[in-house]
């Protein structure tokens, strides 16, 4: 099994925006710039927009200006581009799959937003619809996130990009093939050798590396969070505004819903400082909420039978009686236990607990 030509029968589920099979790198970059200026979000932008790395504000600025800098001048970016087909071919042999270069730039329209992607490869020999996304990394931070070969524990940024692709092309999963370099000292020379026509197999003999393939299955909840957040980004982009100030609602759900292996990782000082900061912020937030409730109750006592306060003619505080219909689940379970059991839905999520160091040390 290996890298093959795209079958003539191949039909994507996403809408074909451009045929890319005959484009050179400059033409492909110009196409991405064009769609970026129109406010369409590609899969490669999603990790930065969600705050997994980079700056969402910087992404907005680059999309509007079309000035992404000369990415080809960055050795690591150039190396990854030059090695993409080699990684895809090696990974397809490891997985015993035929894959082919996806010849299209695809889009999916959602609530006026075009979400787009250019898949690296599509899997030909699989009973479901799967793609293959190839990455190359020497980053210590990324390598820390990578789990074992054939697990689902890839980098969160890589997973977000894969889930975005699944959204656009209605995929069941993505094989995320990652070429992991021992360090980046060989990259600049490797780029020069590749551009001189030396075969990748020969070059990689002298570079410490491994290839791991991660199996990223479709996660509908993660996809929903990505879609909702990018829809909000689109609203802000077309109005001339900045990205949503806090993507944490979407990112938090996306991060917490990952399966966890039960192991604990020893934190460094930087990580411990972040944990302590979270603890303090949550404690301060709880204390402030309790203080606000106390003052609120005090103001209502002083109101007597009045409905609120004004200041300089402007309404500032109002108490309203509101009626709402609520389903009495406790009574329903008591009166109709079998029916309640039939409609019971079990959901799973991960809860974050921050431990108080001072309490644990005593």
Image (spheres, rainbow, N blue to C red):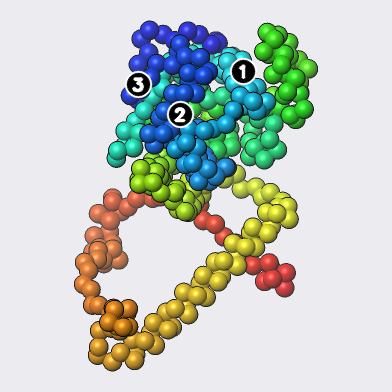
Residue depicted at x 68% and y 54%:
271
Whole-angstrom CA distance, mark 3 to mark 1, is 25 Å
Give me the residue at 57% from left, 42% from top. 54
Mark-to-mark CA distance, 2 and 1: 21 Å
Rendered location of residue 222, percent (x, y): 44, 42
Q: Position of residue 40 (x, y in %)?
A: 39, 34
Quadrant of residue 18 within the rendered picture:
top left
SS at mark 1 in the image: helix
Which is nearer the eye, 67 or 47?
67
* Residue count near mark 2 (Cα–Cα under 10 Å), binned few <14, some 14–19, many ≥20: many
3 or 2: tag closer to the N-terminus:
3
Disc 2, SS: helix
Residue 10 quadrant: top left
Q: Which residue appears at 24% of the width and 66% of the height? A: 326
- Report the quarter where the C terminus lies: bottom right
- Residue 339 appears anywhere in the view: yes
Would you name the residue on which mark 1 appears?
Answer: 82
Seen from the viewer's position, the closer of residues 122 and 246 is 246
Give the quadrant of the N terminus: top right
User: Label 2, on which residue?
Assistant: 33
> Which of pointers 2 and 1 indicates the residue nearer the eye?
2
Question: Who comes first in sequence, dot 3 or dot 1?
Answer: 3
- Whole-angstrom CA distance, mark 3 to mark 2, is 17 Å
The residue wearing badge 3 is 16
Q: Which residue is drawn at 67% across and 40% down?
A: 141
Residue 23, compared with residue 347, is above or below; it is above
Q: Could you tell me if the residues under marks 3 and 2 are in contact, i.e. CB atoms within 8 Å?
A: no
Q: In this view, does 198 lie above or below 128?
A: above
Label tally: 3
Report crowding for label 3: few under 14, some 14 to 19, many 20 or more residues within 10 A (C-alpha): some
Q: In this view, does 245 lie above or below 152?
A: below
């Amino acid at each position: 099994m290996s890298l093959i030509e795209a079958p003539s029968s191949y039909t994507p589920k996403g809408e074909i925006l451009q045929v890319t099979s005959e484009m050179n790198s400059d033409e492909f970059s110009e196409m991405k710039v064009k769609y970026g200026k129109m406010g369409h979000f590609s899969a490669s932008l999603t990790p930065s927009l969600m705050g997994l790395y980079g700056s969402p504000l910087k992404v907005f600025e680059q999309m509007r200006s079309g000035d992404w800098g000369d990415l080809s001048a960055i050795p690591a970016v150039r190396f990854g581009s030059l090695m993409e087909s080699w990684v895809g071919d090696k990974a397809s042999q490891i997985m015993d799959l035929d894959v082919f270069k996806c010849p299209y730039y695809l889009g999916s329209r959602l609530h006026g937003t075009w979400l787009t992607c250019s898949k690296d490869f599509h899997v030909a020999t699989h009973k479901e619809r799967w793609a293959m996304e190839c990455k190359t990394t020497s980053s210590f931070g990324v390598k820390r996130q990578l789990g074992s070969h054939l697990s689902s524990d890839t980098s969160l940024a890589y997973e977000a990009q894969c889930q975005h692709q699944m959204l656009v092309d209605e995929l069941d999963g993505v094989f995320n093939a990652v070429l992991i370099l021992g360090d980046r000292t060989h990259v600049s020379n490797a780029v020069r050798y590749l551009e001189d026509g030396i075969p990748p197999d020969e070059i990689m003999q002298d570079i410490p590396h491994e290839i791991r393939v991660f199996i990223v299955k479709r996660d509908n909840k993660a996809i929903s969070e990505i879609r909702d957040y990018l829809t909000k980004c689109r609203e802000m982009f077309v109005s001339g505004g900045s990205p949503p100030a806090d993507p944490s609602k979407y990112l938090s759900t996306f991060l917490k819903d990952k399966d966890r292996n039960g192991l604990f990782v020893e934190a460094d000082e930087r990580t411990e400082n972040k944990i302590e900061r979270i603890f303090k912020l949550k404690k301060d937030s709880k204390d402030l909420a309790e203080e606000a409730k106390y003052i609120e109750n005090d103001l209502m006592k002083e109101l007597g039978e009045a409905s609120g306060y004004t200041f300089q003619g402007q309404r500032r505080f109002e108490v309203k009686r509101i009626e709402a219909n609520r389903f009495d689940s406790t009574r329903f379970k008591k009166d109709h236990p079998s029916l309640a059991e039939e409609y019971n839905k079990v959901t799973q999520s991960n809860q974050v607990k921050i431990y108080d160091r001072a309490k644990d040390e005593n």
